[in-house]
Amino acid sequence: MAASKKSGGPRDMLESMYSVIALVFILVACVELCDAAAVVDVYRLIQYDMSGSPFGSRLASLNHHAASLHFPPGADLSRTVLIIPLRELNITFVREYINQKKPLGGLLFLLPEVFRFENGGNKQIHEKEKMKNVLAELEQLLIHANIPYPVYFAFENDEIETVLADIKKNDAIGQPATATTGGYKLVIPTPEPKKVASPTITNIQGWLAGLKADGEANQLPTIAIVASYDTFGVAPALSVGSDSNGSGIVALLEIARLFSLLYSNPKTRGRYNLLFGLTSGGPYNYNGTQKWLRSFDQRLRESIDYAICLNSIGSWDNELWIHVSKPPENAYIKQIFEGFSNVAEELDLKVGLKHKKINISNPRVAWEHEQFSRLRVTAATLSELSVAPDILEGTGGLFDSRQFVNETAIIRGVKLVAESLARHIYGHQGKNVQIFADDSSLAVNPAYVRSWLDLLSQTPRVAPFLSKNDPFVMALKKELVDHTDEVNVQHENLEGMFTFYDSTSARLNIYQVASVTFDLLLLLVLGSYLIVLFSFLVITTRGLDDLISLFRRPPSRKVKTA
């Protein structure tokens, strides 16, 4: 009995030792596999339908091998994702693949880190300027194309740069990633996109009541200051629109703050009502502005003396444009233009006038003031743009970021609008009177402008993906509550010819995949190891005869019977 216990001890020890060795081997293999994977934040190309026609990227999930632009000629890319850094972008190649509908597994565009808000700076402006035109061209190509595979954007980092360097090396020697040769595999395990059901748009208005004289029964005239706050871009999760129209929102909020100081004192309250409107649906023919105006009662609409709409005033040098629908000879238009021109001359600025007649039968609305003009309300748009952008263009692209916006330009724009309005309200037209002088308590606050501009430059604002109670919408409402007497919020469904789909961002998993040859070799090594281990354990526990008996042919039935 004692002898059997003695002999059992070492055998048990051997079995435990080999089990531990096998477990360590498996753990090491797993660690190596985990180390080979990287995870990257990616942002999907917008997917939408316009009048029933599909546009943008129609798929979201991804599970293909990766390749660079150095792939061998004639290679089959139907199950391959091309990784294209913006610095190496060949727009002709991309246009050819998309327009000719060549088979492709997917596209991943790498944006330089300089395009991130937190990584921008004045030293990098020159680099961004060089890529701005290329990026704008790429955006318009992708937005207006129907692409039957996933398209994503990501920012460059050390991990993805290392992966791309390996991919380029393999492509250069004619060994692109396949199931046979191995390489890198890109995986995005996301469900397929679904339609955004009943997307909402939210309009916010603030009201500063003018001062009526004692016994006055007539309604005071109203001046409306309006800006559209939402954006549209090639990647909704990156569409911040610092200039279009973040600059207009910042200017409106600062103008509201300045006039709230004046109107808080009955001695300096003007005899005009001021209506501040933050509207949504701007990229979609100013759908929100139309619904907002139609919610007005006739009395309020008729009381509007004129409306000034603010659009893209953050990256101009010395000239702004006033866009109008009524002829320049119109008395109201002449009065508005002369008022702005006089103030501009004192501020050493230039203001030009652009007239564009509207066609009511055409659903296309190029400028926000045109929605007012369709209801016979005098209105104008102040912008750095001399020509209206085409539909879904110039409304918050990837290049419209914080580093391209000049705070000084916004401050000068605020001064121009605020002084022009104040002289009209207080009857100081033609007089060199600075109500909002730099050294006064009514001076424009650069810190306020900067803080709101920074917030807007980090906040994507594509309307279909903003909920009614989105924190950004609530922040706008709170700001108007702080500076105006009465704030109303209007929620409406986004109507028209557009349908949108979700899945705007995801996590990309990058795996280093071994070739089939490696898998077979590993299988052979593991099989041999297990056979040797099994044989050794049988010999040490049962003896060599038992091991041999396992491989003997069993006796036939007749032999057993005999």
Image (cartoon, helix red, strand yellow):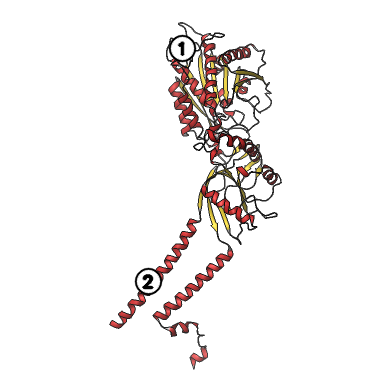
Label drawn at residue 269: 1
The amino acid sitting under disc 2 is Ser
Q: Position of residue 437 (x, y in %)?
A: 48, 15
Q: Are marks 1 and 2 in contact (CB under 8 Å)?
A: no
Q: Nearer the viewer, residue 359 or 315?
A: 315
Residue underneath mark 2 = 16
- How far from the left and from the top, in percent, is residue 473? 48, 31
Separation (CA) of disc 1 from disc 2: 90 Å
Q: Is residue 342 above or below residue 478?
A: above
Outermost right residue = 100
State which tag comes first along the sequence, 1 or 2: 2
Q: Is residue 443 left or right of residue 307?
A: left
Q: Is residue 277 visible?
A: no
- For the residue pair 427 and 127, the one nearer the viewer reads as 127
Give me the residue at 46% from left, 29% from top: 451
Residue at the farthest front position: 123
Q: Residue at x 46, y 27 (%)?
A: 477
Q: Secondary structure at mark 2?
A: helix
Residue drawn 58% across the image and 66% down it:
517
Q: Amino acid at mark 1?
A: Arg
- Residue 452's label in the rendered image is none
